[in-house]
Image (cartoon, coloured by chain):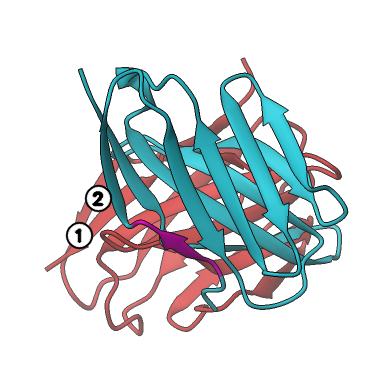
Chain colours: A red, B cyan
Amino acid sequence: DGGITQSPKYLFRKEGQNVTLSCEQNLNHDAMYWYRQDPGQGLRLIYYSQIVNDFQKGDIAEGYSVSREKKESFPLTVTSAQKNPTAFYLCASSSTLSPLHFGNGTRLTVT
Amino acid sequence: SQQGEEDPQALSIQEGENATMNCSYKTSINNLQWYRQNSGRGLVHLILIRSNEREKHSGRLRVTLDTSKKSSSLLITASRAADTASYFCATEEDWEGAQKLVFGQGTRLTINP
């Protein structure tokens, strides 16, 4: 069964620590995306990647970093520079002419 | 940037009734998409309507697009309890190989049995 796997589902960290969220897809999609969702809000684009070893900043990239070393993987690191990191993080992928396929998200809580 | 604005923010109806959600946007678009999100889950794509289309159907879903008014509506007919979810519109401005979708804030739909 093809899909996107995000892990872990829940993540707790202390303020000042960096944390990496995992996203893996087996859909053979070229493009991958990270979105942030705050309670009662829509999604905001953090980073996206169209191809391996290349990625671009979205609307709210400050305090985040990504890598795309493999087609299947697009991990997101939330750094200590992100002022309000507590949120629901969604990873997605797509290919040409296909809609976005989303994972089931990681809920990050920083205290 | 948040382009889509959805109306209403929340909608509660009885099972069997029709549900209509509206989305307005600000700039020219290539297409507009609707997604559904069940609580605590990822989004699921429902339907895409291109800028040169005015209406599209998929099962119990009907989407309209009025580019002159920069607005779209999603109609769910004969609603079911399983339709309870948040619904988001998303617009795509430029096609660069990756879809830089801009999402609205969503409509929370509750279907009462």
**Where does the image place residue B112, in percent across and percent down from the top left?**
20, 25
- SS of the residue under disc 1: strand
Density class for disc 2 (Cα within 10 Å; few <14, some 14-19, many ≥20) is: some
Q: Name above or below for residue B102 compared with residue A1.
A: below
At 37% across and 51% down in the image, what residue appears?
B107
Q: Which residues are magenta?
A: B4-8
- SS of the residue under disc 2: strand
Q: Nearer the viewer, residue B16 or B100?
A: B16
Dots 2 and 1: beta carbons under 8 Å? yes
Residue beneath disc 1 = A109
Density class for disc 1 (Cα within 10 Å; few <14, some 14-19, many ≥20) is: some
Residue beneath disc 2 = A11
* Quadrant of residue B27 within the rendered picture: bottom right
Residue A94 marker? none
Dot placed on the residue nearer the N-terminal end, 2 or 1? 2
Q: Is residue A71 visible?
A: no
At 55% across and 53% down in the image, what residue appears?
B89
**Chain under callout 2:** A
**At label 1, which amino acid type do we have?**
Thr
* Residue B111 in magenta stretch: no
At 82% across and 57% down in the image, what residue appears?
B51
Q: Are marks 2 and 1 on the same chain?
A: yes
**At label 2, which amino acid type do we have?**
Leu
